[in-house]
Amino acid sequence: MISTLLVANRGEIACRVFRTCRELGIRTVAVFSDADADALHVREADAAVRLPGAAPSETYLRGDLVVAAALAAGADAVHPGYGFLSENAGFARAVTEAGLTWIGPPPEAIEAMASKTRAKELLGIAPLTDVTEDDLPVLVKAAAGGGGRGMRIVRELAGLEAALEAASAEAASAFGDGEVFVEPYVENGRHVEVQVLADTHGTVWTLGTRDCSLQRRHQKVIEEAPAPGLPAALVEELYERSAAAAKAVGYAGAGTVEFLVEDVPRALGSARAEGSPRAHFLEMNTRLQVEHPVTEEVYGVDLVALQIAVAEGAPLPPEPPAARGHAVEARLYAEDPAAEWAPQTGRLHAFGVPGVRVDTGYVSGDTVPVHYDAMLAKVVAHAPTRAEAVRRLAHALERAVLHGPATNRDLLVASLRHADFQDDRRLDTGFYERHLDALAVPPAGAEHAAVAAALAEASRNSGRFGGGWRNVRSGDETRAYGEHEVRYRPTRDGGFEVLAPGGVRVVSAAPDRVRLETDGVVRDFEVASYGPGDAGVVHVGPHRLAPRPRFTDPREQTLPGSLLAPMPGTVVRLADGLAVGDRVEAGQPLLWLEAMKMEHRVVAPASGTLTALHAAPGRQVEVGALLAVVQTEAQEDQTA
């Protein structure tokens, strides 16, 4: 029996495994980088071992350091979580060779399936080579790892070489393996997967389907179980193929077989086409998936507990439990829609989601670091029907307290309530390509939230809350938040009168709560702000309001053609041969930043001459740091 377990991972998944260990009476050990010294997973573990450094390549990807940490802490088992070393056969062997129990499949199964290219070969699927125009579009994909890293869609042959190079560099950074391959890209398909669980006695469970079609930048955003609207014959085919794949490699433990389903009829009001849609094998993930909670909720199981039981040699019952109801999961990320969805860092002053399951590596007061994935939490709702689960999840996210960095909360709520998501005939991987611009808008009510923010600030500064009382009529005041401008004046009875926008009556106003009446309806607005370190951002219910600056942003005073870092991160590489004095074209990639495990291109803003280059590979930069300067052709003409 396992007595002490080390999780070779961080954040949310480490906390998730620790929760099960506590229920089973197993002691826990965390590993942590310098950037994670005060992280929640470290605080929740019974013991923790430091991995010196911050970058994943120095810490969580160092299998030798992780094994040494397990031995030093007296652990007798290692759970890899997902990502990092979870599909590394060499690491699995190192764990077992050190006399520790590996919570996962045999290394041989990992070798067979962890590489997507080798998995396809094993199942008789030929890779795509010698790409021609007739093959387009294609997808360049990392052979190891997942999470959307190391993936690029190619629609023109001229862009294939650059896509291969970029995907390889990103994969090497994220997974320590730069191998990539090319496969056909199916437009508007359904991403469907099957959860498998196998013991060492020959029993293989298929625990239902999941749909993960809502993806952006090849990263899953919303997942659900079971996958809705699939013909029964197709579901049986997916079960059979998934069980066969697990048996083919002698699998043991929890894993996922992923497919891309095409030709699902989408025309509203039409009958479904005869026959089953075609399902293309994508890969088998030989580890726990990020989206495993939806399966747990539907089947009433603890997959981590079952992983541990299998590793201890226990047999599974002949049949899995019966499914019940529907579950939907949304991935809550720290990212700013106003800045092209750039990952965000900073302090989470207040954090909570009511009434549903929340798997997270953060609590109020924690800081989101720059070095790792930007996911704050997985928020999961379960209900008897899909419609009820979707409604519960949207409502919980809308009521969530998220005071700190910008998040994708509004996108999640709008996605869950969109007609194309609620109708399973319209689900496909092209959802965000079609709807992102329309979905990426602030929630309704921002205008009145701005009024509440302005009056809360005025209340803090008024005589009733510590300021000097003036027995004279004050002039009108103006405050602006984004596109919303608020004009108001204090009244002689100590209240406020709103002049713009019109139709608003102030019922009461205090620094943390404002009550307004509009069109005969009274609404309460909870208001929170956290000082100058947050650039004056005010949180009003689900609204995150940034005050419009009264003075020019210093970044706007930089030289024309200046390239500023759009986010904090690390310069991973420069364009080949890039040097001061080079001629560059508008849109030409000049350098790549890595932030939170994703690469972001920084391109020339216009055609001209590179007159300064302050970026260098390995350099850490803060948001707004000057990376380079391009003197445009118009500027050159003026100085000639």
Image (cartoon, rainbow, N blue to C red):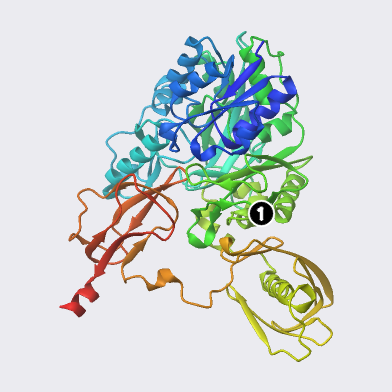
Q: Above or below — where is 103 with respect to 613?
A: above
Q: Residues within 10 Å of mark 1 (few under 14, many from 20)?
A: many
Q: Residue at x 15, y 78 (%)?
A: 640
Q: Is residue 445 left or right of residue 92?
A: right
Q: Is residue 513 left or right of residue 308?
A: right
**Residue, disc 1:** 402
Question: Residue at the left extreme?
Answer: 640
Q: Residue at x 29, y 67 (%)?
A: 606
Q: Is residue 318 visible?
A: yes
**Viewer-proximal residue, 266 or 219?**
219
Q: Where does residue 77 sit, x and y in percent of width and height?
A: 58, 16
The amino acid type found where label 1 is placed reads Leu
Q: Residue at x 74, y 53 (%)?
A: 395
**Viewer-proximal residue, 255 or 497?**
497
How many numbered marks does the figure carry? 1
Q: Above or below — where is 493 with respect to 285?
A: below
Q: Where does residue 455 sit, x and y in percent of width and height?
A: 72, 75
Q: Where does residue 281 sit, x and y in percent of width and height?
A: 48, 30
Q: Residue 583 is drawn in which quadrant?
A: bottom left
Q: Is residue 265 visible?
A: no
Q: Quadrant of the N terminus?
A: top right
